Amino acid sequence: MSRINKTKYIILGMLAIRPMSGYEIHSMIKKTTANFWSESSGQIYPNLAALLKDSAISCENESNDSKHKSKIYALTKKGLEVLQQWLPTTATRHPPRDELLLKLFFGKNMTEEECQKLILQRKHKAEENLEFLTSTKEHLEQQHKNRADFPYWLITIDHGIFTAHAEIEWCDAILKNLKKSLRRR
Amino acid sequence: MSRINKTKYIILGMLAIRPMSGYEIHSMIKKTTANFWSESSGQIYPNLAALLKDSAISCENESNDSKHKSKIYALTKKGLEVLQQWLPTTATRHPPRDELLLKLFFGKNMTEEECQKLILQRKHKAEENLEFLTSTKEHLEQQHKNRADFPYWLITIDHGIFTAHAEIEWCDAILKNLKKSLRRR
DNA sequence: TCGCACATGTAACGCGTTACATGATTAC
DNA sequence: GTAATCATGTAACGCGTTACATGTGCGA
């Protein structure tokens, strides 16, 4: 039951921002929700077709200004209702999968140097991510401050920032412990 | 490529702790790695068979003391090598999926009360989890302090604790903002 | 002209969950 | 007796990724 296809909802949500082509939806997802949600085109196009069939979205063939011709989809009244019905329902957790933690759980079977290396990789990723999120936040505050979406987008970015900070602190804390035990040998 | 079956590795890792039955592996996973990794029996049993075929594990039918008869699996030398080869390789990220963040990203299409409710649900979950992790940590420190596994298990628990704290702080921060804007209406 | 971004799609594949089947033993 | 736990498995299903196919327009 929890394995229900949510691609439809992210499509509806994106089209609630403004009408878009499938390609635009995909790039939007990669640009804005990459930290907490991803979709592949292999999911998007079939779901667009299904939503169209259910008349949750409408489609207009547009060759906008002699440029690339694309299918511009728009949310219908029914589509908005479907979205609004889903949004307030309790968010289900899909099973967690953090490969680094799994490896560290079995860390006894590695050298401590190998452990250290894995943790450092994670730390670097978190630092990069933090930097990216911070600059995205600034950009958002400058460019889209007055959009109705703005406060909600900020919420998701802040989540990433809080999480990245925690990740870095955790890495530092356990790296310190590892160094201690490495020195003791 | 990144969709490679990791169930085999968690099985090998668990058997590196001590020989176990499939059922024990499953309960162990539910008890110890639930926060960052889960497996269903539909994954475990077929993978046990595959590992046995590859002679990465061995199997002994044991009816231990007239109790339930179960198949006790043990890691072979080859199995340990497979595990040790995998562990130090860079941990790959599987695509993230956080349904709450997705919903909040589209929060414009909800009432702020609905948003608030969703966030509170998350906060409660994080608080419960934090409590559970803290008591688990205490229990571990009392009971398993001298196991070689202990420091590594602690690392994964600490990750959960750091993350839960961050989650709670984030919830509080954005709830405060929501309340402000609710009051402004 | 070569590559990149734009643009839409399909097919294969397999991972992982859910649900079910079966049966023993223990505890109330 | 009947519910819960121990214990092992299988089958269906579908989600999601990867890879591929196809083609346009633009800039270096």
Image: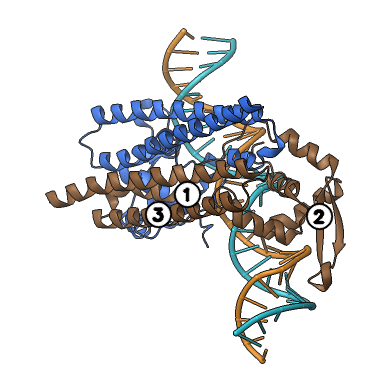
Chain colours: A brown, B blue, C orange, D cyan
Picture coordinates of residue A68, whole percent (x, y):
78, 71
Distance from label 1 to label 2 (Cα)?
40 Å
* Rendered residue at 86%/46% (across/down): A55
Given the image, on which type of amino acid does mark 2 rest? Tyr
Residue under pointer 1:
B7
SS category of the residue bearing label 1 = helix
Name above or below for residue B79 compared with residue B182. Answer: below
Residue B59 visible in the displayed image: no
Residue A21 visible in the displayed image: yes
Picture coordinates of residue A155, whole percent (x, y):
56, 41
Cβ atoms under marks 1 and 2 closer than 8 Å? no
Q: Mark 3, chain letter?
A: A
Name above or below for residue B7 compared with residue B177. Answer: below
Q: What count of labels does the image hold?
A: 3
SS category of the residue bearing label 2 = strand
Residue under pointer 2:
A73
Dot 3 alpha-carbon crowd within 10 angstroms: few under 14, some 14 to 19, many 20 or more: some
Query: Do marks 1 and 2 share a chain?
Result: no
Q: Mark 1, chain letter?
A: B
Q: Quadrant of residue B91?
A: bottom left
Residue under pointer 3:
A127
Given the image, on which type of amino acid does mark 1 rest? Thr
